[in-house]
Amino acid sequence: MTDSAKILLVDDEPAMLRYIRTLLEVDDYKVETASTGEEALQRVDKGLEPDLVLLDVLMPGIDGLETLEQLRKKRPGVKVVMLSCVNDTKKVVQAMRLGAHDYLTKPFQKAELDAVIDQCLGQGKTPVGGEVEEVGEDTFFIAASPAMRKIRSQAALVAHVDIPVLLLGESGTGKEVLARLIHKLSQRAHRTFLKVNCAAVPADLLESELFGYEPGAFTGATHAKPGKFELCNKGTILLDEIGEMPPQLQAKLLHVLQDQHFSRLGSRSVIKVDVRILAATNIDIPQALASKRLREDLYYRLNAFTLQLPPLRERKEEIPILLKHFMTRMAERYARPQLPLSPKLLEACQAHSWPGNLRELNNFLKRYLILGDENLAAAELQPRHDGNGGAGARGDSGAKGEASGGLKSLARSAKDEAEGEAIRQALEQTNWNRKQAAALLQISYKALLYKIRQYGIAEAKGHHKLSAGA
């Protein structure tokens, strides 16, 4: 413990003040107390600069939320943990929006208090200063930038409150990892966590996937099957790519959010469940609402609290830490020695914009580990342009231009051309059905979409538009 840390404890109950003060002084913290919000603010005005404030929500006079708001104005950098004898969802959400770092429900154990203080003061196994936090099997959360530390703090706070959370951010920014972190920090941590990718399941099958079905509900339904919501009862479900869910199914999901019950396909009986719903998307929300792609009532129901993950290009200070972490993990997985991350390679990584975010970074390092050529890896990050001003398929002039850069550039050009041609052939073979083409190429649907954009593949005239499904 850090014996120099100063904690301001604010609570109107004398017995609670004495109890918490005793717990803190056992660990050599310097403790100041106040019995009202007004007194706490006066102490701060007179020069008190606490490292942490433990603040009761329900107090006479200026309550905890108003005190929190004024404290954040007077000391923007101070960390505040709210204390309450009731787990009031609205107050917790309001406290988060006002900048509280955590929320403890009284009565609490010393271990709970210690964990929260350690997280706030950077003494525990939390991702402060670039530390890696394990959130599941082979899944880690890293917060080395101010933006990601704020996200981690908000996730810890919202985890305690059973409300839906909407996770926003570009593809590959780590929305699923954040969802797993929220589940791990919640009271449902020992229960099931399930992810459903709404874009990967055909629209006509998504309803049965989520809610299950009875025998005879449709052709081929020979036996009863529980849906994801039943399997996830008492746990947490992540609805990834929620913007791809058909509007008629969004209406049924809205009823589940409101009433926590539904019926299987082909059944009249009602099933009651208790499931924490997290939703993730990378769509433009205002545009999706305007085009009726996303139901407005569902959006506001899901948007009890929103966490927006920044793209990697806005948190480049994390790149060296992420590279080192990915290198360690993949070297173990593939039984290969770790490769050096030279200043030249780090500089190239810092200069790259990473449109694919963490997923692109991970795949880049995987290729570097397998190929073992630092110069080739660094060259891969250089911007590429073809004769038409794009970075997609190259003509002869583009290939000749790259040939002047050496055999490695020529090899990369040939590889890209071959890969682009294979994708075109798969699309032609499946009548430009992207999901069938992805299956034929044995890559994910998202990977195919990325490569179509990467190579600038356009459909020949005479075909119908690219379709996502049959």
Image (tube, grey):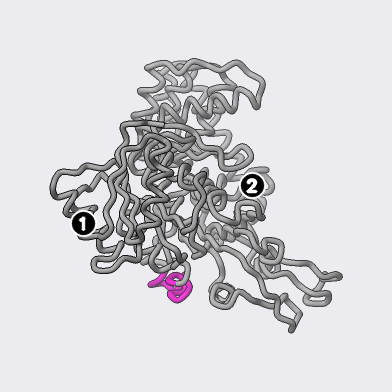
Q: Is residue 98 above or below residue 117?
A: below
Residue 249 figure quarter:
bottom right
Disc with the residue nearer the chain's start (2 vs 1): 1
Coordinates of residue 89 in the picture (x, y in percent): 44, 67
Q: Amino acid at mark 1?
A: Glu
Q: Is residue 141 magenta?
A: no
- In what quadrant of the picture does the C terminus appear? bottom right
Q: Residue placed at 50% from the left, 53% from the top? A: 108
Q: Judging from the image, what secondary structure is the residue with disc 2 in?
A: helix
Residue most extreme to the left: 46
Tag shown at residue 168: none
Q: CA distance from mark 2 to mark 1?
A: 71 Å
Q: Amino acid at mark 2?
A: Ala
Q: Is residue 421 above or below residue 335?
A: below
Q: Is residue 44 above or below residue 348?
A: below
State which region is magenta. Answer: 289-300
Q: Residue placed at 50% from the left, 40% from the top? A: 141
Q: Residue placed at 19% from the left, 44% from the top? A: 48
Residue 442 figure quarter:
top right
Would you say the residues marked 2 and 1 are in contact, meaning their CB atoms lie under 8 Å apart?
no
Q: Judging from the image, what secondary structure is the residue with disc 1 in?
A: helix
Residue sitting nearer the eye, 274 or 125? 125
- In what quadrant of the picture does the N terminus appear? top left
Coordinates of residue 347 in the picture (x, y in percent): 35, 23
Tag 2: Cα neighbours inside 10 Å, few (<14), some, or many (≥20)?
Answer: many
Residue sitting nearer the eye, 34 or 305? 34
Q: Is residue 294 magenta?
A: yes
**Residue annotated with mark 1:** 39
Tag 1: Cα neighbours inside 10 Å, few (<14), some, or many (≥20)?
Answer: some
**Residue annotated with mark 2:** 426
Residue most extreme to the right: 222
Q: Residue placed at 39% from the left, 22% from the top? A: 346
